[in-house]
Image (cartoon, rainbow, N blue to C red):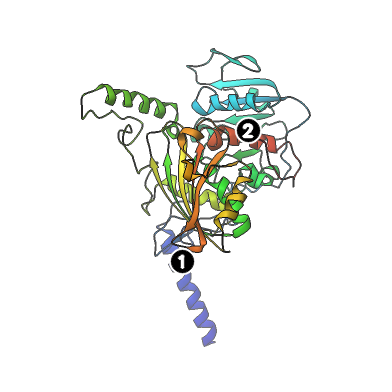
Amino acid sequence: SASTMKSAAVLALLVVCLAAADAFAPASIPLVARSASSRAFSAPLSHGFASRSLVSGARASPLRASRASSPRMTVSLPADKPLKVGICGATGAVGKEIIGVLETRGFKVGELRLFGSERSAGRKVETKFGEVTIEDFDLERARELDVVFVSVSGDFSKEWCEKMAEGEGGAVVIDNSSAFRYEKDISLCVPEINADSARKGSKKVIANPNCTTAIGIMALWPLHQKYGLKKVLMSTYQAASGAGAEGMAELRDGAKVVVDGPEGTVAPNKFFAHPLPFNLIPHIDVFQDNLYTKEEMKVTWECQKIMNLPDLPVSCTSVRIPTFRAHAETIVIETEKPINPDEARKLLASAPGCVLVDDPQNKKYPMPLTASKAYGVEVGRVRQSVVFGDHGLEFFVCGDQLLRGAALNAVLVAESLMQPIGTPFNPKL
C-alpha cells in the first residue's frame, strides 16, 4: 500500500542518515543523533555508547560497554583479618601517599608488597608495617594479594589490571588512572556516594575518579540529595601535583630560577604547556573538538556517572596554578528546589568528607595552604547566586589533590568493601 511504501522510504532515509553521520564519529563508537538541548554534554549512562549533539558540537560522555558484559558479583574484602596489600607505582607521588594513608588510617596490613620501576627495584622503604623492598612488577605475585592499588599509567592499567583481578584467585584492583573510568560495567567510585557500585560490580577492578571530580563532588552530592541539581558551572584552579612529582619539582625549581635571577627571568618548562611559576595556564590535558579540554570534560562525564545523573549539565574551565598539591574550585549550581545558604552551610558542615570553613568576617575560607595534606575537603564562601536567585548557590572548595583526589579515595574504596552491600559509608577522617 501507499502507506507501507511511505514508511519504508522514511526508514531507509533514516538508515542512510545515521550511516553518514557514523562516518564522522570515532571508530568503535556508534553515533546516535539527538536534538540540541541543555543536555548537549551528556549521554545516557545506562547505554554502552556515546552521543554527540550535532548542533552544539559538544563532546558527549565516552562511556563504553565492556568487551563482554559480565554477571554481577559481590566484591568484598574481609574486615576481620590483616590483608595482603600491593601498590603498583609505589615510588610515585600518589604511591607514596597511599602508603601514608594506610599507616595513618590503621588499615590492617598483614603483608605489604611495593612494585616499582626497574630503576627503583631493590631499594628498601621503611614503613609502619616494617621494612619493604621495592620489586619489579610480577603478575603472579600481584594475584596472590587481597587488594592492589595501581598508580602508574593508563597503558599499564589497561595491560595488567584485569589480569590481576581475573577469577576467584585474583585480587581486588583499585586503579588511579583513567583507563576504566568510562567502562559501563566498572565502578567509578567515591565511596561516600556510591560504595554499592563497587560492592556489586561485575569485575574486581574499581576505578578512582579524576582528582578534580573527587574533590568537588564531595560538596555537590549532599546538595543534590536535598535540593536537586539542575546545572553545575565550575572553574578549577589546579595544583602542580596534578602532573605528578615531576610537575611539583618543575614548579619548585622554576620558582627558584625566577627569584634568584634578574628581573624578567622566565622559568623553563618541560611538563607544563608554559612556565608555571608566577603564571596561570588555562590548559590541562588535550583540547577536544568542542574546545573544552579533556580534563574539563572528565568533570562532566564523571559527575554524571558517579551521581547517576546522566543528563546533568556540567560545564568546567580548568586552570593550572602555581601551588603544590591542593586543588581549588569555584562552583555555581542551579537547583530544582529553592536553596537557602544558611541551611546549605549546616548541610555541608555535617556532610561526609566536608569541612565547613566559612567565616569571611574573620578571613576564614578554603585555601590551598590550609587544605594541603588534610583529608577533608574545605567548603566555604557559601552564598546565594545573583544569577539563579533562590534556586542557586555559589561556593568555593579546596582539597588535597594527592589525598582526596587520589590516595585517600582509593584506600576508602577498599575500606568500604569491608562493609555489607547497602551500608552507607561514612568514614571518620
**Disc assigned to residue 286:** none
Residue 272 location (% of width, % of height): 35, 34
Instruction: Looking at the picture, tell me which residue is in the foreground, 408 or 132.
Output: 408
Q: How many marks?
A: 2
Quarter location, residue 374: top right
Q: Residue 270's image quarter?
A: top left
Secondary structure beneath label 1: loop
Q: CA distance from mark 1 to mark 2?
A: 39 Å
Amino acid type shown at disc 1? Ser
Residue for point 44% across, 32% down: 241
Q: Amino acid at mark 2?
A: Val
| Disc 2 element | helix
Q: Is residue 345 above or below residue 416?
A: below
Q: Quadrant of the N terminus?
A: bottom right
Which residue of the protein is positioned furthest toward the front in this rendering?
361
Residue on which the image places disc 2: 411
* Residue neighbourhood size for the residue with mark 1, other residues' Cα within 10 Å, grouped as few (<14), some (14–19), many (≥20): few
How far from the left and from the top, in percent, is residue 397? 50, 44
How far across and how far down the image is residue 316, in percent? 43, 50
- Placement of the C terminus among the 4 image quadrants: top right
Of tags 1 and 2, which is closer to the observer? 2
Q: Which residue is mark 1?
A: 37
- In the rendered image, which quarter is residue 271 located in? top left
